[in-house]
Amino acid sequence: MQRCITGFRQDEEGHWIADLECGHSQHVRHNPPWFVRAWVTTEQGRCEALASMRLECRLCDDTAATR
């Protein structure tokens, strides 16, 4: 399920984590060539993502599938 990003925080290794509206969270690493998310590396990029980006929440998908 697509969920809005409500905030960001960093884990103990300095990787960015997006907090989602459903209460779950997801790492949003910029690790080319596997993950190209240059927007996460700047404060401006993260702020813009708050207003416009949705991420797929696999935990919500799993919960919906078991109902």
Image (cartoon, rainbow, N blue to C red):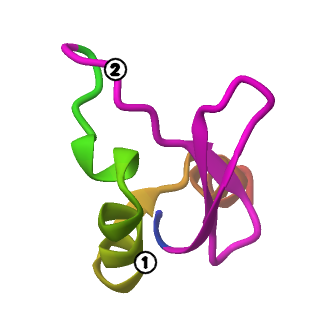
Q: How many labels does the image show?
A: 2
Say which amino acid is labelled 2: Asn
For residue 63, side relative to residue 5 (left or right): right
Q: Earlier in the sequence, mark 2 or mark 1?
A: 2
18 shown above or below 13: below
Which residue occupies 75% across, 36% down? 11
Say if the magenta span includes residue 65.
no
Residue 67 is situated, as x and y percent measured from the top left of the image, at 74, 60
User: Which quarter of the picture shows residue 6?
Assistant: bottom right
24 shown above or below 62: below
Say which amino acid is labelled 1: Leu
Which residue occupies 63% across, 78% down? 21
The residue labelled by disc 1 is 50
Q: Is mark 1 on a helix, strand or loop?
A: helix
50 shown above or below 17: below
Which residue occupies 59% across, 32% down? 15
The residue labelled by disc 2 is 31
Which residue occupies 71% across, 23% down? 13
- The foreground one among 2 and 38 is 38
- The foreground one among 16 and 67 is 16
Neighbor class of circle 2 (other Cα within 10 Å; few <14, some 14-19, many 20+) is few
Q: What span is in magenta?
A: 5-33
For residue 39, side relative to residue 9 (left or right): left
Say if the magenta span includes residue 26.
yes
User: Which quarter of the picture shows residue 35?
Assistant: top left
3 shown above or below 63: below
Residue 52 is situated, as x and y percent measured from the top left of the image, at 28, 80
